[in-house]
Amino acid sequence: MTFIESKAIVVCRPGAQALRFADLSIHREDSMLLLGPSGSGKTTLLSVLAGLLHPSTGRVLVENRDIYALRSRMRDHLRGRHFGFVFQTLHLLPSLTLRQNIALAADMLGVKAEDGRIDHLLGTLGLADKAHRKPDALSQGEQQRAAIARAVLNRPSIIVADEPTSALDDSNSQKVMDLLEHQAQETGAALLIATHDTRIMNRFQNVMHLNDQMKEVA
């Protein structure tokens, strides 16, 4: 079953060339890589697909519902329920403990985290002994694992990661990909990654190339 698809997406920006994207379709448990250099529109396309940026033309369907035909509150609820994000900037709140940062994913959706779910994720990601530490007491790798835990807390239908490996060395980039793939498999989620990091390309059969002319997806 198709979970998300886009059709004829164009994003116009004042004083800049329009971004035109090829149609895409992602099924549950699919993995897709959006590959392109900086400025090719990767983050823009992620934002459109997640209901964060209204395209100038085109449609985005999530479970056959046109998300931009929904009211903003309904779109926010749909995003919170179905999407788990690992941002390029991790957005861990410095005043909260690791456990509290992870719990925010449920709090912001207005639901209670599944019993034992946070502890399970902490254990799976090697963070059990860091649960009550704040982000500045964690290594970069530990912070990234915490961000992955927060993204998958609510068992999303799709995990979306923006440049999750580009700042990492070869060994750590593969470890992060292993974690993302394992969490997607565990929750039955699709995995959508946007990056310019060609080192991870061989992990994906489904690759969409975004060109550097900012005109169209190849």
Image (cartoon, rainbow, N blue to C red):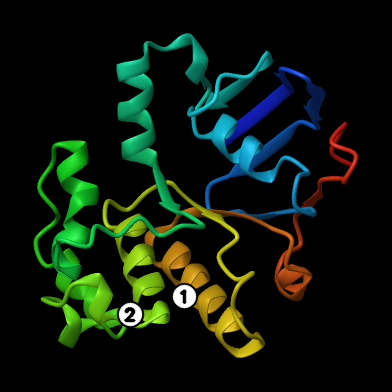
Q: Residue furthest front?
A: 15
Eyeballing the image, is 141 above or below 62?
A: below
Eyeballing the image, is 73 above or below 80?
A: above
**Residue 6 at what x, y percent from top left?**
66, 28
Task: Name the residue located 87 percent from the left edge and 31 percent from the top edge.
Answer: 215
Q: Which residue is mark 1?
A: 179
Label 1 and label 2: CA atoms lie apart by: 8 Å
Eyeballing the image, is 79 above or below 158?
A: above
Q: Amino acid at mark 2?
A: Leu
Q: Amino acid at mark 1?
A: Leu
Pointer 1 or 2: first along the chain: 2
- Camera sees residue 140: yes
Q: Secondary structure at mark 1?
A: helix
Q: Give the crowd class for mark 1: few <14, some 14-19, many >=20 residues within 10 Å.
A: some
Q: Is residue 2 left or right of residue 13?
A: left
Q: Which quadrant of the figure contains the N terminus?
A: top right
- Camera sees residue 2: no
Eyeballing the image, is 138 above or below 217?
A: below
Q: Residue 125, labelled with which disc?
A: 2
Circles 1 and 2: CB distance less than 8 Å? yes
Task: Name the residue located 32 percent from the left edge and 19 percent from the top edge.
Answer: 74
**Residue 188 at what x, y percent from top left?**
43, 57
Task: Name the residue located 30 percent from the left edge and 18 percent from the top edge.
Answer: 73
> On the image, which quarter does residue 57 sit in?
top right
Q: Give the crowd class for mark 2: few <14, some 14-19, many >=20 residues within 10 Å.
A: some
Nearest the viewer among 42 and 206 is 42
Q: Residue 53, labelled with which disc?
A: none
Task: Name the residue located 49 percent from the left edge and 27 percent from the top edge.
Answer: 51
Q: Is residue 74 left or right of residue 197?
A: left
Q: Secondary structure at mark 2?
A: loop
